[in-house]
Each structure stands twice: as C-alpha cells, then as structure tokens.
C-alpha cells in the first residue's frame, strides 16, 4: 500500500498490523535470532540479496552501505530532494523515507538496473547525455529514475506537466531546462 505525496513519489505505508516479519526459520538464515535484527531478502535489479538489518535501516542505507549500490544518492536524507529516488514495483519512491523491511518481496529497481545487459543505456539515460542535462551529476540518478516513472505514468505530455511531476527532484546546479528537454525527448522516443 502506498500514500501519495505532492512530489509524485509515494511513501510506502507499514504493514497493516504494524509489525515487520522476522522469520529466521523460513528465511533459512544461519544467524541466531536477534531481537534487534531482521533477516530480509531484498530483490534488487532482479537479484535477491539476503541481509540481516536492524528494523530502522532505510532502503537507501541498505542499498549504499550494505550492497554497495551507490548510484542511488543521499542528499537531504529527509524526503526533500529526490536524490534517492528508486522504483518499487515500478513506482517511484524515496529510499530515504522507506525502511528496507517494508520492501521485502517487492521488485526494487535502482539506477544500476536501468542499463540493458549488453550495456545499452535506457532511453532516458541516453536523453540526459544528449541534452547535457546535468552539471555535477549528484541529482542525476534520482532525476532519471523519476523521469522513467514520470513518462510511464503518462505525466510527460508537456513541459509544464514534466516540471510539475518532476518537482520532487531538486537540482542545486539549476540544470532544469536541460532536464525538461531530456524528459521531453525520451518521452517522444518511447512513444514512437
Ligand atoms: S535523500 Fe531522499 S529525498 Fe533527499
Ligand atoms: S546536476 Fe548538480 S545537483 Fe543537479
């Protein structure tokens, strides 16, 4: 279940009973049960990873610190900048506001998972390069993940719409005109 916020990125609600599962026997983990650690299996870019994490660990920290998937960036760490945007079951979410335990069993996609197996860039990644849609590049993975979802949602019909539905992704370098041009180009190419 997800809750929509004004930036377009939903926040995943906790389980209805308010309790996250810690079933070591079912997971096959050899670690002793711990009152403070959850044994989780996270499916990221099509690959399943077994992790023992404290319930408070965010998806962002699990990706970056435990799995070395550092393409997803930490900007504000409080839901304000969009640098940490990833997809969960195809929807864009803010990884800094999502607990790793909330997304067990879901399909997580990060910027590393957008590239084809043969190394071909995703249409949106290629458009960002062609339109020179970045300067320092720190916001770029989040911008691209958000743009992929924005186009898939059907919210890239005009520059105004792109600006509105990409508003949750901030760029300190002010590359906005080029970012909008890249999303416009990618949307056109993906429709063709
Ligand atoms: S790091 Fe998540 S929104 Fe800024
Ligand atoms: S390119 Fe530097 S923050 Fe966006």
Image: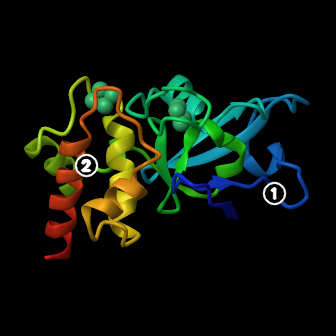
Q: Is residue 184 left or right of residue 70?
A: left
Q: Is residue 61 above or below residue 5?
A: above
User: In the rendered view of the protein, which quadrant contains the C terminus?
Assistant: bottom left
Q: Is 41 or 188 nearer to us in this picture?
A: 188
- Residue 114 locus on image (x, y percent): 31, 50
For residue 104, say whether it is visible: no
N-terminal-most mark, 2 or 1: 1
- For residue 15, the mark is 1
Q: Is residue 89 above or below residue 53?
A: below
Query: Could you tell me which residue is drawn at 91 percent across and 30 percent down?
Result: 35
Mark 2, mark 1: which one is toward the viewer? 1
Counting other residues with Cα less than 10 Å from the Cα at mark 2, is it few (<14), some (14-19), or many (20 or more)?
few
Q: Quadrant of residue 16?
A: bottom right
In the orientation shown, which residue stands out farthest toward the bottom? 192
- Residue 61 locus on image (x, y percent): 58, 28
- For residue 115, the mark is 2
Q: Is residue 131 left or right of residue 115?
A: left
């Amino acid at each position: 279940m997800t809750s929509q916020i004004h930036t377009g990125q939903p926040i995943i609600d906790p389980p209805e009973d308010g309790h996250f599962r810690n079933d070591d026997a079912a997971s096959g983990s050899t670690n002793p049960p711990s009152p403070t650690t959850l044994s989780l299996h996270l499916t990221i870019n099509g690959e399943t990873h077994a992790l023992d994490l404290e319930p408070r660990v965010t998806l962002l920290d699990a990706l970056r610190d435990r799995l070395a998937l550092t393409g997803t960036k930490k900007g504000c760490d409080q839901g304000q900048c969009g640098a940490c945007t990833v997809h969960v079951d195809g929807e864009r979410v803010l990884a800094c506001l999502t607990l790793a335990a909330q997304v067990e069993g879901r399909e997580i996609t990060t910027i590393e998972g957008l590239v084809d197996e043969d190394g071909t860039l995703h249409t949106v990644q290629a458009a960002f390069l062609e339109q020179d849609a970045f300067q320092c590049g720190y916001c770029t993975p989040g911008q691209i993940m958000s743009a992929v979802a924005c186009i898939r949602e059907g919210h890239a019909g005009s520059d105004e719409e792109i600006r509105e539905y990409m508003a949750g992704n901030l760029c300190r370098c002010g590359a906005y005109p080029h970012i909008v041009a890249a999303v416009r180009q990618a949307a056109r190419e993906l429709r063709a």
